[in-house]
Structure formats: C-alpha cells, structure tokens
Image (cartoon, rainbow, N blue to C red):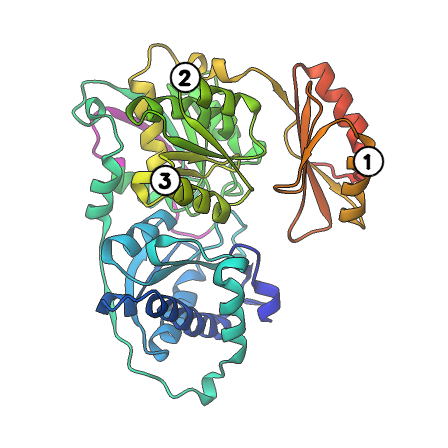
Amino acid sequence: MLGKVFKTYDIRATYPKPLNEKLAWQIGYASAQYLTEQAAEAGYDDPMMRHVVVGRDMRTSSPALAEALKQGIRDSGAHVVDVGMVDTPLCYFAINELGCCGGVQVTASHNPASYNGFKISKIGAKPVGMTSGLNDIRRYAALVDRDKVRPHDGREESRDLWDAYQQHVLRFLEPALVDGAKTIKVVIDASNGMAGTMVPKVFGQIPGLKITRLNFDNSTGEFVHEPNPLVEANLQQVREKVVAAKADLGICFDGDADRCMVVDERAEIIGCDLLTAWLAQGFLRTHPGSAIVYDLRSSKSLAEMILEAGGTPIRSRVGHVFLKQKMAEHNAVFGGEVSGHFYFRANYHADSGAIALAAVVSALAGADGPLSEQIRPARRYVQSGEINFETDDKNAALEELQLAYPSARIDMLDGVTLDSGKWWCNVRPSNTESLLRLNLEGPDRETVNARVEEVSQYLGKRVAH
C-alpha cells in the first residue's frame, strides 16, 4: 500500500483505499523519526526540535487522518503542535515561528474530494521530496509495525497562530491599502478550499480591499469546481464575476491555498511567468541586483525583464522542491513558477498564496493604470501552453527530438530544452505517467503552431484536454 501513496513530492491517494488511518499512523511515526533525526544530525539541541507541527485542510477525511498521524508522531516519542485547520503556507510559517524540526500538512491540494495526503517539511519548512527525505520516510514506514511498537509518551498541544500569521502576511501589503488611502476591488474564488478560511482571517478587515467572494464555503469538503486553478474551465466563475463586478482583478486559489492564478480587469488569464516578470520589477526596485528564481517553462520575456531591471535571473527545474532549493542557494528575493507557486525570501524562501495575493494587490495599488497594461510589457512572445503526449518510451522520444535538431542549442536541466534561436521548447517526462509535456514559445502564433506540429511527430500521441 505504501508504494501506491508515496509520490515524487508528497504523499497522496484516494481515501480510504489505499490511503487510510493505518497508513497515516505509520507515516506519522516515520515522519517524526526522520525529522527528529535530521535535527539531531544538524546539531540542534533546542527542546522544540522534538516537536512536529501538524495542520490539516477542510476535507472530510482530514480530521481522522490527522488524528492517526498525530498518534504515530507521539508514539515515536516526538511531540505534536496541532495548528488546526489551516492553509499549507501557515504550516510552513508555524515551523519557523515555533522553531520546530518540521511539520506535516494533511491535504490533497488540488485533487478531487475523494483524495487526501500529506505534505512534509523539515527544519525551516524546507520541502521533503523523494530525493530529499521522502524515500527515507517511506522506508521507515514500511519497517514499523504498530502491534510491535512500544509507544512512547509524546505530548500534544494546540496553538492558534492566525493572529501571528496575519501580522506576518500583512508585512507584504501596501500600507495605503491597510489604512484605506487606496482601494482595490478584487474577486477571490476560494475553490471551496482553505482560502475560504485564510482570506477572511488575514484580509477580511483591510479597508482598502473590497473583496467579492466566490466559493468560500469549505464546510462540506465538496467542490463547486475542481480546486485546480491551472485548468482554464475552473476560472470561468472568477472571470465572469470580475466583469460583472467591474473589479480590478480576480484571483483563484487551489485547495490548500498555496497556489493561485490571476485574471486582469478584462478577465484575461495572466500566465504565472508573466505575473512573475511584473512582480519582479517591484522586488528589484527595493532589492537592487537580487536574484529572481523561475522555472524553465517560463517565457523568455521573464529573464529579459529581470536583466533589464538589473536583477539576476536564476533558471530552475520544475517543482517546488527545486524552486525552494534555488531560492535558498541564491538568497533570491522572489521566485515564481508557471504552476502558480510564488516564493519570497522574507517568507523563509517558501511559497505562499496569501503573500502572493498581498504582493499582487500591493503592486497594482502602486501602479499607474490597470493590470492589463502592467502585464503588457511581458507579452513579448506567443506560447503554446502545456501539451501532453502519450508515449511508450519517453527516453527514446527525447533522443529522437534532439537528433532532429542538430543545430539547436540544447540543455538537459529538466527534460530537453531546445532553442533554435527563433523559437524554443522544453519537453519534460512526467514523473508518474507515460507522458511527455511540451511547452513551446515563438515570435508569433503562426510560428508556434507550425513548430508544435513539427515537434509533435517525435513525441507520441497528443492527449486531448
């Protein structure tokens, strides 16, 4: 069963089969074992380094899974700090605020209601992925037998950190919005997820934010639409409401509120790479010369605009584990990923949907003109969007692609990135499926369509949306 629930970046599966309370106990025990060992090996002797933060989302299975997880942590001899039903970034905040050895958020993020899972972080809220600890936790979990374990007497305490979290997030908010000197009208779609709790608690009393709420009820564990803002159909409600309400922008969150997508005042969807390019300008004004991290699927305009603003563009592999590593390695002030994760140096180099909301409305409050005009300078090229292909041999397809373009500049940071000079593309293999994912960019739609058709012949069968 363990092999079915452990993924590349987290633990996730349908509930109650294969993910259930029995596995949750094993994962709790194993996570505590791994996290406390990491703290000890790093030389930490603070008593809080025997404490593991536990948070959960609003799914109906989350309370039971959280209880089993916490029992496993306590039976291992570690202690639990339960922060309650919170967004995933609050769990990251709690690990740092309290100085714990790590934390576990019970969530399945953007997956349907029948799913659940665990996102595990270590000291400093550094992510635990398969190559950075998750494989060890899987091994520990496979070896532990609850019937043969002599339980230790780990303690548990509950902490309400919403006030401290609000103060932390509001440090990123434009003071003119806090005191009401400026006003931004924003439509927020919480996707029946944790943004439905987070937004009222953090932003509900800000005079300068006039918030129109969509899908804030997260009491049933059901979703009006899939809580995945990367799927265009899931943005339909927020786009329609932005136009109807004459709002300045709209924001749609995923299930655990660590990712978001933004639409402008005309209800046009803004790619997160273009949003990163715009937001980076403000961070580079206040932190000249700083590094900005972005994932390699991003438009070339992003790196160009970072350089034009005097910053240092840092290209990363796709995935929050890699983005956070690059953020810390280069002490980057800001980072963005096409998937909707936004990272902040002043947030422990971690991602936060709440801070992304604060950053976007603050930048717009200080701008001259609507959001569509602010983003226009980043719209220098035409993008294909991500296109998936089914193939029986991903490696062979990637090799064939490289051979087809012998004069192109090629790198292998993540899959194959091929740059012809006039157009470029990245093709990455899926970690979990027999799929290749293509992103292609060129100077105009005609070139992009032609090159997608050309490249597609090497990649397999195109998957319809």
Measuring from the top left, give residue 104's x and y in whole percent.
39, 60
Q: Is residue 31 above or below residue 443?
A: below
Q: Name the residue under label 3.
A: 331
- What residue appears at the point 29 percent right and 77 percent down from the top-left corner? 154
Picture quarter with the N terminus:
bottom right
Residue 456 shows in the view: yes
Measuring from the top left, give residue 97's x and y in whole percent.
24, 53
Q: Is residue 238 above or below residue 128?
A: above
Measuring from the top left, give residue 57's x and y in whole percent.
39, 54
Is residue 195 located in the magenta-colored stretch of the structure? no
Mark 1 is on which residue type? Answer: Leu
Q: Mark 1 points at which residue?
A: 403
| Crowd rating for badge 3 (residues with CA inside 10 Å; few <14, some 14–19, many 20+) | some
Q: Which region shows up in magenta?
A: 203-221
- State the separation of the CA atoms marked 3 and 2: 29 Å
311 or 57: nearer the viewer:
311
Q: In this view, does 269 lie above or below 169?
A: above
Where, by quadrant of the figure, is residue 75 drawn? Answer: bottom left
Mark 2 is on which residue type? Answer: Leu
Is residue 206 located in the magenta-colored stretch of the structure? yes
- What residue appears at the point 31 percent right and 42 percent down from the top-left corner? 347
